[in-house]
Amino acid sequence: MEIEIKKYLYDIQQSILSIENYLGENLDFNVYMSNQMLRRAVEREFEIIGEAMNRLEKNAPNINISAKKQIIGMRNRVIHGYDKIDDGIIWGVVVRHLPVLKREIEQMIKEIK
């Protein structure tokens, strides 16, 4: 696998770990909503995840990530639709979809080592 592909996978993994670190073990939507800096930090990590995914799609379109198109679309909404970000949707992605993405990325990284 090309070095760029590995880099994108690691970038995604690091952003996922950063989001988990920012939010802590006890995920609490009220804490998330009450802290603008926390929300912005999580949004920034989603921008990085989406951009790395976009580059993966261009360089390795056959890579199997279940929500690849949705991740790229979310990145575009966060960047270009900053004034229309729905914190509830972001939170739903954190709770429901980020763990799935984490498992997929971790498995791919294991396979390439």
Image (spheres, rainbow, N blue to C red):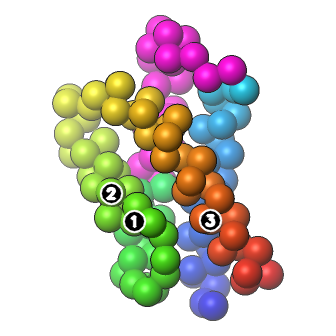
Region rendered in magenta:
26-48
Residue type at the position of mark 2: Gln
Question: What residue sits right under mark 3 in the picture?
Answer: 105
Q: Residue at x 70, y 26 (%)?
A: 24
Find the residue positioned furthest to the bottom: 1
Q: Amino acid at mark 1?
A: Lys
Return the mark for residue 68: 1
Mark on residue 70? Answer: 2
- Residue 106 vertical position relative to residue 57 in the rendered view, above or below: above
User: Which badge, 2 or 3, comes first in the chain's sequence?
Assistant: 2
Q: Quadrant of the C terminus?
A: bottom right
Q: Nearer the viewer, residue 53 or 64?
A: 64
Residues at badges 2 and 3 in contact (C-beta under 8 Å)?
no
Overall secondary structure of the magenta stretch?
Answer: helix
Amino acid residing under circle 3: Ile
In the displayed structure, would residue 27 be above or below residue 62?
above
Query: Gap between marks 2 and 3, in whole Å?
Result: 16 Å
Rendered location of residue 78, percent (x, y)? 31, 42
Of 55 and 73, the residue lying toward us: 73
> Is residue 79 visible to the viewer in this orientation of the structure?
no
Q: Residues within 10 Å of mark 1 (few under 14, many from 20)?
A: some
**Can the viewer see residue 24?**
yes
The part of the image, by quadrant, that contains residue 23 is: top right
Task: Tell me the crowding category of disc 2: few under 14, some 14 to 19, or many 20 or more residues within 10 angstroms, Cα based.
Answer: few
Numbered disc 1: secondary structure: helix
Mark 2 and mark 1 in contact (Cβ < 8 Å)? Answer: yes
Q: Is residue 70 above or below residue 108?
A: above
Q: Is residue 75 left or right of residue 53?
A: left
Q: Position of residue 52 (x, y in %)?
A: 47, 65
Query: In which quadrant is the N terminus drawn?
Result: bottom right
Q: Residue at x 66, y 37 (%)?
A: 20
Helix, strand, or loop for circle 2? helix
